[in-house]
Image (tube, grey):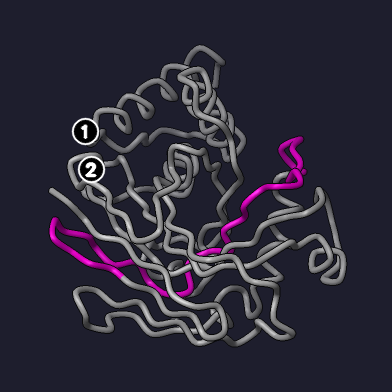
Amino acid sequence: MMTNDLQDIAATLDNAMFSATATPQLGGTLSLDDAYAIQAMSFDRRLERGEVRVGMKMGFTSRAKMVQMGVDEMIWGRLTDKMLVEEGGSISKADYVHPRCEPEIAFLLKKPLAGRVTALQAQTAIEAIAPAIEVIDSRYENFKFSLTDVVADNSSSSGVVIGAWNSVPDDISNLGMVLSQNGKAVEIGSSAAILGHPIRSLIAASRLVEERGEVLEAGSIVLAGGATAAIALSAGDKVKLDVEQLGRVNFSVEP
């Protein structure tokens, strides 16, 4: 697809995000390369408005999410400082098209990662780990999309609430995770749902960004991917995530 066409799509998706207005699915014959090019172009518009890149998120790293969204490949998207939600704070539903959230584990890197790395190399690049809740929001009508649609739309990434940073426990392969909504546990899972071990997600993140000519810089936040299916959010909701050994993170939803 021609660059001008990709730029037009990027502008459409950015405007849909900025105005919290749903847009039709892209359709057509976009390649995955086209989709990531659109994502980058749309993201550049955020940077031009003064936002600062702070990291990246992995998507579709659990079987539950793949089944829920009807896809079968891992994807990734970019994070900015404007997408960071204060722990214990709130978001406004009016700023989103149809927001959902999912339980995550966040890594903070102390040195760069790129390309194919071993588990040991990935582990030694981690400064700290935290419980996190990602707020996702597809800009497409009815929350329906193809693989290339969602990649172009920054892999639905819209916000993230990060809890207290911890030193990395000896074993994070099977940490219990409970996502509660208005005092009721609605999703119960484990970090094992993230590719069998969250470190595998960091390994995949390193490979995937390098394929696009990028590097996970020191100081970057990396979201390992949802451990369960996402839940829909409504005004008035109070959401909490408890992660074994890592602690708790919470936020609320205003109108």
Q: Is residue 34 magenta?
A: no
* Of 43 and 36, the residue lying toward us: 43
Q: Is residue 235 magenta?
A: yes
Q: Residue at x 56, y 15 (%)?
A: 3
Res 108 quadrant in image: bottom right
Q: In the displayed structure, does residue 212 sit left or right of residue 14?
A: right
Identify the amino acid type marked 2: Val
Q: In the displayed structure, does residue 36 sit left or right of residue 116?
A: left
Q: Residue at x 29, y 30 (%)?
A: 16
Res 240 quadrant in image: bottom left
Q: In the displayed structure, does residue 116 sit left or right of residue 211?
A: right
The percent coordinates of residue 236 (x first, y second) are 13, 60
The percent coordinates of residue 148 (x first, y second) are 48, 43
Helix, strand or loop status at disc 1: loop
The percent coordinates of residue 103 (x first, y second) are 43, 69
Which stretch did the figure color magenta? 210-239
The percent coordinates of residue 176 (x first, y second) are 50, 87
* Of 1 and 129, the residue lying toward us: 129
| Comes first in the chain, label 2 or label 1 | 1
Q: Which mark is residue 97?
A: 2
Considering only vertical position in the picture, is 211 above or below 250? above
* Of 197 and 84, the residue lying toward us: 84
Considering only vertical position in the picture, is 20 above or below 204? above
Identify the amino acid type marked 1: Thr
Q: Which mark is residue 21?
A: 1
Q: In the displayed structure, does residue 8 sit left or right of residue 139?
A: right
